[in-house]
Amino acid sequence: MKILKYITFTFFSSLLVVSCGGGSDNENPVDPVVPTVIDPDAASLVFPEDNTECNEGVINTNDETKSTVTFQWSASENTDSYEIKIKNLETGSITTATSTTIQKEVSINRGTPYEWYVISIANGTSSTASSETWTFYNQGQGIENYAPFPAVAISPQRGSTISSANATITLEWSTSDVDDDIVSYEVLFDTTETTVTSLGSTTESSIDVSVSAETTYYWKVITTDSFDNTSTSELFEFRVE
């Protein structure tokens, strides 16, 4: 009986050594499984609507020059949070807000044109996605007619370099007006950032200009409506090879 007990103990001891020994030293370690983070999709803007007057803001009781507007957008896939960018088109200043929902209350100036867009953010990746950019006027006290939105360059694109194959190119822009009463555009075009040379006024949203090779050009557009309200675009620039 002692011999049998000894053999049994030796057998199970051997099993224990084999099971706990970790196998051969030549086996490769297994890499841990790292979950894949999917890049976020772009959100779709809802409110304030594009090229409209926003009249749903709540006037601030401590500062009647401002009102609180609830910005809204649709949920985007693979997104954990959102960053809202709101640009004052008169001053160029940008307000940034964040939200984990699909809306955000932000206090902004009344009687002022703005543009806004939303950036979708996902945890675990540096990739983001941006929505379209919309413009709107935040309603102001006693305003019966709003100035046009500042023009946006279409061609040449801002900061672009173009070929010098042609001595004449076309400057093209776009703009809009809540009241839909734009009557003219004045184009300033120059080789310096002061851009004081006027090409005159036009009712079209494009104009032909003469250019030279190896030169950088600057231009802006002044838009006028039927009430003589005006808006001046940002300074656009391009280079001719």
Image (spheres, grey):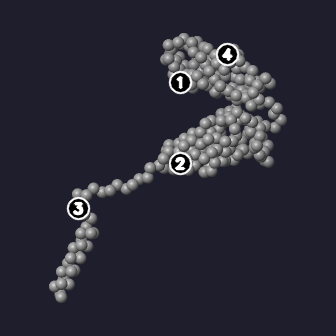
Query: Which tag, 3 or 2, sits closer to the chain's start?
Result: 3
Q: CA distance from mark 4 to mark 2?
A: 49 Å
Can residue 110 be seen at all in this image of the molecule? no
Residue annotated with mark 3: 24
Mark number, residue 160: 1
Q: Secondary structure at mark 1?
A: strand
Residue type, label 2: Asn
Q: CA distance from mark 2 to mark 1?
A: 33 Å
Q: Secondary structure at mark 4?
A: strand
The residue depicted at 64 percent of the width and 41 percent of the height is 45
Dot 3 and dot 2 residues touching (CB under 8 Å): no
Q: Nearer the viewer, residue 186 or 207?
A: 207
Spot occupied by residue 96 in the image (x, y as percentages of width and height): 63, 43
Query: Which tag, 4 or 2, sits closer to the chain's start?
Result: 2
The residue depicted at 23 percent of the width and 61 percent of the height is 24
Can residue 90 be seen at all in this image of the molecule? yes
Q: Nearer the viewer, residue 23 or 228?
A: 23
Query: Residue 154: which quarter of the image?
Result: top right
Dot 1 and dot 4 residues touching (CB under 8 Å): no
Dot 2 and dot 1 residues touching (CB under 8 Å): no
Q: Secondary structure at mark 3?
A: loop
Residue type, label 1: Ser
Quadrant in which the N terminus is drawn = bottom left
Residue type, label 3: Ser
Dot 4 and dot 2 residues touching (CB under 8 Å): no
